[in-house]
Amino acid sequence: MNMERIKKLFDDFTFHARVMPIIVISIPILVVGILGGVIRDNWFENSIWLFIGIALLTITSKVARNLGKDFEEKMYKQLGEKPTTIILRFSDDKLDTITKQRYHKRLNEFDGLELPLDKSSETLDDDEQYSSAANFLRNYANSNRDKEPRVYQELKEYNFWRNLYGTKIIALSLYFLIAVREVILAKEFNVLQIFLHPYPNYIALLFILVSMFFVALFINKKAVNQKGFDYAKALIEVCERISVDKRKAETVID
């Protein structure tokens, strides 16, 4: 099953946000299966690993989202609020004060919104206003993806990294089990030989260990947080591109 056939089974967002994380964590498993078939001349084993990889791809795409959502709730608690709310606060410095004032003035043109225009007038109650403003912009951006492609792209990137981080523990657990299996299958196991002469006996083990290292190091909370704020910034910038007539005609505050 090639990538184009897989894409046809899912819509664009689902493929990028739910399926791609599973593909990423499945690649090392598939590679180990192929190496087992080539080096050990055991294509039955290879077929089993390929089946496991495809099964992971098709069965756990929804699991990836659920794990990602669980992490998202924890992330919001650690941050104190959603990135969209945080970035609108004057107490946050991800946007300069002048830009933030301009955004607040624009957002105040929506019925029901009264965002503060400086830090001295900002209170904790304003978080509800920030959340409402973000909801409006989100609804508008989702309804106008053709006009706001960057918001949609940042949303997909955020969901990809969120779900990928959610599956991190599954990936590391699977890789660990595969590494243990490779150690058991190795003849006269020698740690030094893994790095000095990995081929052919230790190449699969070395590959899975490197995969574990990269997953543990690069798939982290910092990356997810950064993508969350990238999406928040792109979403809030939408307020400057909505025409006056559009703002009056489509004011719907949740």
Image (cartoon, rainbow, N blue to C red):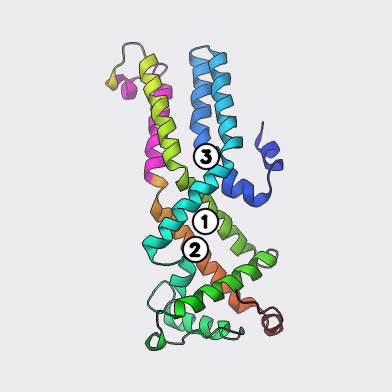
Q: CA distance from mark 2 to mark 1?
A: 8 Å
User: Mark 2: few, some, or many residues within 10 Å (few <14, many ≥20)?
Assistant: some
Task: Please say if 124 is above or below 221.
Answer: below
Q: Quadrant of residue 240?
A: bottom right
Identify the residue shown where x is 37% and y is 77%. 91
Q: Which mark is residue 230?
A: 2
Disc 2 residue type (three-letter): Asp
Q: Main secondary structure of the magenta part?
A: helix
State yes or no: residue 15 in magenta: no
Which residue is labeled 1 in the image? 158
Nearer to the camera, 120 or 77: 77
Kindly report which numbered mark, 2 or 1, lies closer to the viewer in this rendering: 1
Mark 1 or mark 3: whose residue is earlier in sequence: 3
The residue located at (52%, 56%) in the rendering is 158
Whether the magenta-drawn stretch holds residue 196 is answered as yes
Q: Quarter-wise, where is residue 238 in the image?
A: bottom right
Question: Which residue position holds label 3?
Answer: 24
